[in-house]
Image (spheres, rainbow, N blue to C red):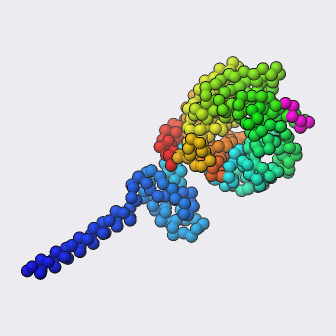
Amino acid sequence: MNKFIKYLTITLAIFGIFFIFISIKTIYLEKPKNDDLIISETKNRVGELDLIKTQEMEEVELEIIEEKQDNEPGEKSSESPISIKNPINLEEQLVTHLLDIKSGSSSKGIAFSKDDKELWVTLLMNKSTGIRIFNPKTGEELESINLNGNGGVEVIFSQDGTKAYVSQMETAKIFEIDTNTKEILRILNTNSAWTKVLKLSPDEKMIYASNWVGNNVSEIDLITGILKQNISTVKTPRGIYVTRDGKILYVAGFKDGEIQKINLETEEKQIIYQAGGAMRHIVADEEKNILYISDMGQGKILKVSLENDEIKEFAKTDTNPNTIALSPDNKILFVSNRGANYSRDNYYLPGPEWGSVLLFDTETGKMLDAIIGGNQPTALAISSDGKILAFSNFLDGEIEIYQIPPSEILKTGNGGISKIYKGWIDK
């Protein structure tokens, strides 16, 4: 009897140990160790992992991983994977994603050609290719232009579309390019430092260029190609605007958050706004005599009257708003937001949240729709017919292309995903 009890005890102990082992295996090997952290694959790239804070996506994401692991590297699965960047239900989104274009690193500026058949992209401090030109409908690369071994910052076109002007930060020069042959026609010298934004005078006889380190704006005669003068400005000038009569220059000062007004005839200078932000970009609704200016430091857009210089806050944005653009009918303002920086002193690495592009009603300041971008959405452009939006994810070397519905549909669309998108900004 004692032997039977002894054997029974040993048998139960063995089964108990086996049961405990199976339980531990189930808990620790078959499930994530932290239910709040789900390992998931992003953007169809095998071997790259990302952590997202969501339990609702767990089953879907793990299925995607298993499906991808059955494929060879570089082989596409039968079904497109869900992008972690946009896991929300996009049925309410009013704009429509069309395609992504791999543009190369540090895509700083974007502009549609006048016929909308080409998308010109500048690559900041790129030694081999300053500009890459794509077909915005297919993403096909059409041409690349070497800017004498350095990169490009901003690109603008003449009214007739025959010439492009590209600023180069490293050399403080401006490249004039034939848009048909893609040949460099002239190189214009600013005799300053770190040239950024370009603006043509209304008659296109002059070109103005803001110089970030030079703390001035260059005025260059396009007939002769000779620098007329460098106009001293507030520190780190970036966005600039010349009024339709060619008499007044507005300057967005980044360092101290100033808006400066300069009379080009009398050289009188006046700071009309200073609030400690970081002014970046200026666009104009010339029909209503209004300027819109992005304040990257305080996360907002300002509205400036050209009639009396009255300044009002137009709208709050996401973190680090930079480039802004108006729809051709001036009814919609588009704002790219880089998102939070990696750290206080480092914005060269991806930060803790995705960037965004926001659409605002210019009459009311109401947000009409939103797009969750990639790492640091920066450059922004709208086609001349107002149907296509292009923006760059600066740190990803990527351009995203979206279709824009008519303004009236945006205005009556109940805000698209503007009420819910912020729940998915954090990575």
Q: Closer to the camera, 96 or 317?
A: 317
- Residue range highlighted in magenta: 224-229
Image point 62% across, 40% down: which residue?
336
Instruction: Specify whether residue 114 is painted magenta.
Output: no
Q: Position of residue 376 (x, y in %)?
A: 61, 45
Image point 56% across, 46% down: which residue?
342
Report which quarter residue 172 is drawn in.
top right
Residue 363 located left or right of residue 190: left
Residue 160 located left or right of residue 282: right
Q: Position of residue 371 (x, y in %)?
A: 57, 44
Q: Is residue 344 above or below residue 302?
A: below
Q: Position of residue 235 (x, y in %)?
A: 71, 31
Q: Closer to the camera, 298 or 207?
A: 298
Q: Is residue 180 above or below residue 245?
A: below
Q: Position of residue 139 (x, y in %)?
A: 69, 54
Q: Is residue 166 above or below residue 283?
A: below
